[in-house]
């Protein structure tokens, strides 16, 4: 999988580039996320929907996704919407 950030206008692109550059400087590391113009959103097939809820014991979910989400929630609680995660 690749990390990709999509923008819809030049202002968004500038903001994304500035944030990516600042983060790279703060972390002293290259940020791998690629930046592309938005073209079309494709809804994933049904078997991809609610994957975490439907497969809570799947190895990647337990060992990568949930710990990563928990770290994000602890560090940036103000950025989260209310949910049942």
Image: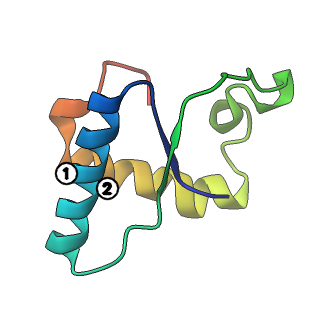
Tell me: residue 59, above or below residue 44. below
Q: Mark 2 points at which residue?
A: 71
Q: Which of 15 and 59 is in front in this view?
A: 15
Residue shown at 44% from the left, 31% from the top = 85
Left or right: where does residue 19 sit relative to residue 72? left
Mark-to-mark CA distance, 1 and 2? 6 Å
Task: Please indicate whether residue 6 sits to the left or right of residue 44 in the image.
Answer: left
Between 50 and 30, which is closer to the camera in this rendering? 30
Judging depth in this view, the residue of 78 and 39 nearest the camera is 39
Q: Position of residue 4 (x, y in %)?
A: 53, 48
Lateral position of residue 61 relative to residue 84, left or right: right
**Image coordinates for residue 41, horizontal then vertical, percent:** 66, 22
Mark 2 Cα-neighbour bin, 10 Å: few <14, some 14–19, many ≥20: few
The residue under the point 21% across, 74% down is: 27
Front one among 64 and 6: 6
The disc placed on residue 75 is: 1
Query: Mark 1–mark 2 contact, CB under 8 Å?
Result: yes
Q: Residue furthest front?
A: 10
């Amino acid at each position: 999988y690749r990390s990709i950030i999509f923008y819809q206008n030049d202002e968004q692109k500038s903001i994304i580039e500035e944030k990516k550059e600042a983060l790279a400087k703060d972390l002293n590391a290259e940020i791998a996320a690629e930046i592309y113009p938005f073209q079309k959103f494709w809804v994933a097939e049904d078997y991809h929907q609610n994957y975490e809820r439907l497969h809570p014991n799947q190895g990647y979910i337990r060992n990568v996704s949930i710990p990563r989400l928990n770290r994000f929630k602890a560090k940036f609680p103000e950025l989260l919407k209310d949910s049942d995660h």
